[in-house]
Amino acid sequence: MYLFTDYFTPAQLTGYVRSALADLPVNQFSLRRWLPTRLVPDLEYRYNKGSGGLTPAGQYRAYDAESPIGKRKGFERRSGSLPPLSEKIRLGEYDRLRIQANPDESIRDLILSDAVTLARKLEARAELARADALVNGSVTISENGVVAAVDFGRNGSNQVTPGTVWSTTATADPLGDLTTWVQYYVDLNGEPPGALVTSTKVRGYMLRNAAIRALAGNLNGTPTILSVDALQSALTAHDLPPIYTYDASYENASGAATKVIPNTDVLLLPAPVAPDDWEGTQLGATFWGNTAESLEPNYGLQGDEPGVVVGNYKVENPLGIWTNAAGISLPVLSNPDMSMRARVL
């Protein structure tokens, strides 16, 4: 098997799939808004755990007095290796396409289609890792002989449950529960969360909740179900963050559709940022480093190595073309206590 560039160079394929990933619909894999992409020209990740949270106050002094000696805020320097992920697919139609009219165009179309499919699968795996970090405060990998766990050290009290599950719409108190959890978050971090991330299913129970519906009652009675706008207004009136629904699913190893985030949960997180604005949030980032392939001169990615990379390879017996996509990535919670998980159903 050798690198094959008759149809596309690795730089062309890599640029194409990176553009395709950037254009992914926001409702598919949107957790990048909370753990945005951070490209690092390395095989390692490094961050300061606990650099956010409460800010120490300075001190007044008398005129002509020496400045008090300050202390750097305590933090823990953490680092580790970014794990690789990759997948390849064979262009099985190659032999047949070679004898068709205008075969080169057909082959190019199939290569581009395969490249985008593979890159999206890698992005889907990165999204699962982001969800793992936000839901559990850790990332666990157990596949293809790789067994690893990264625990970001989130406070155990950041995983909560309500006194009454929210599916009991007659007596549950979602607004009261959220008010309690937000106050805990403020006491811990010095600022409130900026987002409630949950499923359409959980939001549906909130729309039918008796206590929340009563807030919208008037002389004409109480509605049997709230509108989404009315729910957001009720949250705002109680100084609670807005809801962002997240319902993304993936196909697991058995071929079954599986939720990326359990549809029983509510995540309390900072406000979302742009998918590549890793400096705009204190929560953390998704690190993407250099793959072994990207460092090869014949890939032509000098200066643009970090991220997903794609190349074609050719085999002679049996004759065929392989498209290979590779990445090296891990989401990291640099301030894990700025994420909370509430299992409400």
Image (cartoon, helix red, strand yellow):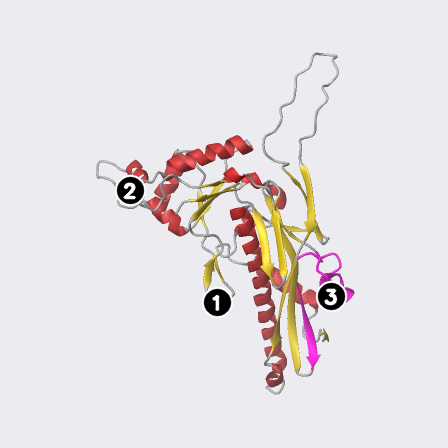
- Residue displayed at 67% across by 74% down: 7
**Tag 3 residue:** 299
Amino acid type, mark 3: Tyr
Pick out the residue farthest to the bottom: 99
Is 322 above or below relative to 260?
A: below
For residue 40, side relative to residue 142 (left or right):
right
**Tag 2 residue:** 170
Give the magenta range. 290-316
Look at the image and say whether residue 301 sits in the magenta stretch: yes
For residue 237, side relative to residue 156 (left or right):
left
Amino acid type, mark 1: Gly
Label 3: which secondary element? helix
Pick out the residue farthest to the right: 297
**Tag 1 residue:** 255
Residue 290, by quadrant, is: bottom right
Inspect this view and state whether residue 48 appears: yes
Is 90 above or below relative to 268?
A: below
- Going from N to C along the chain, the mark reached first, 3 or 1, is 1
Look at the image and say whether residue 92 sits in the magenta stretch: no
- Going from N to C along the chain, the mark reached first, 1 or 2, is 2
Front residue of 34 and 150: 150
Q: Are marks 1 and 2 in contact (CB under 8 Å)?
A: no
Q: Using the numbered discs, state the Cα–Cα distance from disc 3 to disc 1 in whole angstroms.
A: 34 Å
Front residue of 156 and 303: 156
Is 313 above or below relative to 277?
A: below
